[in-house]
Image (spheres, grey):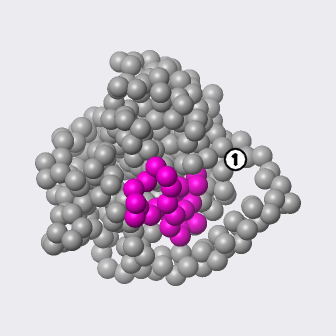
């Protein structure tokens, strides 16, 4: 998977889980599905060519655009707990619920869609609502990743364009997510996700913020989601800590040459993996990158 989850293994013990059951067949007679497969194959070729660019030059930490020159403090302990939650979203639902309830958390609702989008809304033991999205696990998720032309939606700003596959995946669970979130109006909602799940978390956070919720986002190995207008819009509404490490190619796609820009503040894991003293030293191996100036403001931009 995109973000090498062993990077945090020195901090959070691995929680292996049984593979999820295969999704129900979509049906070969579905014209819409057939068109999506055809377009995905065309874009797969484009992505393969573009992927060569990932290994030209050095994969280095980037400077991210952020709406404030003084972002809030990064909470390392909070991040590693949400990382473990993001890992658990890949488990089957029974295992997921058992693990969370053993920690004193309450599973409020799980979300599934025909696009194989999966998310869980839970209440932590202190009552904090957390919405976590799963990353790519099925063939339909991979097709979602490849549908990389840009689209917009009514909950986005004028001029905001985002990855079409990510938008379609989030939209497939959006009504249920907004309905379930109503129970927490007036409270801060934490949103998290790994890889594709991180992209969906960013879209959900913007959507919830526009609906009047305060949101804070933790993502892991997340790809770029939208254009500079979306990045600026996101910064005006949400706080995101975007955790990456230097050898992760997924945080470098879709390529900026195609108009994609990261949002949020990057948190770079300089070290990771291993055990023993590595876990104790892990917090010191985290670098919160200085935010870049807003679009058009001069200075270095993110890669």
* Magenta-colored stretch includes residue 153: yes
Q: Nearer the viewer, residue 128 or 285?
A: 128
Q: Give the x, y percent position of residue 14.
A: 45, 39
At 47% from the left and 23% from the top, the residue drawn is 183
Q: How busy is the neighbourhood of tag 1: few (under 14 within 10 Å), some, or many (20 plus)?
A: some
Query: Which quarter of the picture shows residue 221?
Result: bottom left
Q: Give the x, y percent position of residue 259.
A: 39, 73
Please tell me how many numbered marks the rendered image carries.
1
Whether residue 256 is visible here, answered yes or no, is: yes
At 33% from the left and 65% from the top, the residue drawn is 228
At 73% from the left and 68% from the top, the residue drawn is 35
Q: Nearer the viewer, residue 290 or 95?
A: 290
Q: Give the x, y percent position of residue 224.
A: 41, 62
84 is higher (above) or lower (below) than 171: above
At 39% from the left and 56% from the top, the residue drawn is 157
Q: Nearer the viewer, residue 141 or 152?
A: 152
Q: Give the x, y percent position of residue 299.
A: 15, 72
In the figure, is residue 229 to the left or right of 95? left
170 is higher (above) or lower (below) than 110: below
* Magenta-colored stretch includes residue 282: no
Please state, as top left, top right, bottom left or bottom right, where the C terminus lies in the image: bottom left
In the figure, is residue 45 to the left or right of 55? right
Q: Nearer the viewer, residue 34 or 77?
A: 34
Helix or strand or loop: what does disc 1 sit on? loop
Whether residue 14 is visible here, answered yes or no, is: no
Q: Which residue is mark 1?
A: 114
Residue located farthest toward the right when viewing the structure as drawn:
29
Part of the protein shown in magenta: 147-169
């Amino acid at each position: 998977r995109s973000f090498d989850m062993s990077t945090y293994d020195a901090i959070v013990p691995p929680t292996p889980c049984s593979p999820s059951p295969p999704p129900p067949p979509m049906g070969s007679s579905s014209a819409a599905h057939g068109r999506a497969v055809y377009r995905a194959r065309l874009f797969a070729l484009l992505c393969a060519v573009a992927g060569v660019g990932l290994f030209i030059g050095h994969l280095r930490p980037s400077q991210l655009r952020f709406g404030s020159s003084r972002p809030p403090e990064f909470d390392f302990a909070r991040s590693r707990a949400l990382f473990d939650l993001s890992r658990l979203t890949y488990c089957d639902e029974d295992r997921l619920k058992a693990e969370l309830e053993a920690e004193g958390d309450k599973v409020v609702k799980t979300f599934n869609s025909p696009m194989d989008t999966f998310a869980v809304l839970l209440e932590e033991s202190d009552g904090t609502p957390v919405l976590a999205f799963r990353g790519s696990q099925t063939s339909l998720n991979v097709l979602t990743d490849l549908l990389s032309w840009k689209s917009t939606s009514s909950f986005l700003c004028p001029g905001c364009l985002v990855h079409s596959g990510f938008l379609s995946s989030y939209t497939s669970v959006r009504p249920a997510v907004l309905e379930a979130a109503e129970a927490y109006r007036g409270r801060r909602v934490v949103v998290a996700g790994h890889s594709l799940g991180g992209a969906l978390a960013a879209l959900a956070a913007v959507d919830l913020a526009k609906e009047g919720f305060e949101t804070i986002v933790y993502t892991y190995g997340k790809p770029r989601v939208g254009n500079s207008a979306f990045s600026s819009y996101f910064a005006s509404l949400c706080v995101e800590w975007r955790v990456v490490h230097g050898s992760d190619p997924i945080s470098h796609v879709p390529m900026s040459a195609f108009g994609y820009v990261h949002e949020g503040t990057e948190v770079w894991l300089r070290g990771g993996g291993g055990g023993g003293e590595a876990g104790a030293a892990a917090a010191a191996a985290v670098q919160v990158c200085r935010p870049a100036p807003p679009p058009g403001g001069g200075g270095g931009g993110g890669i």
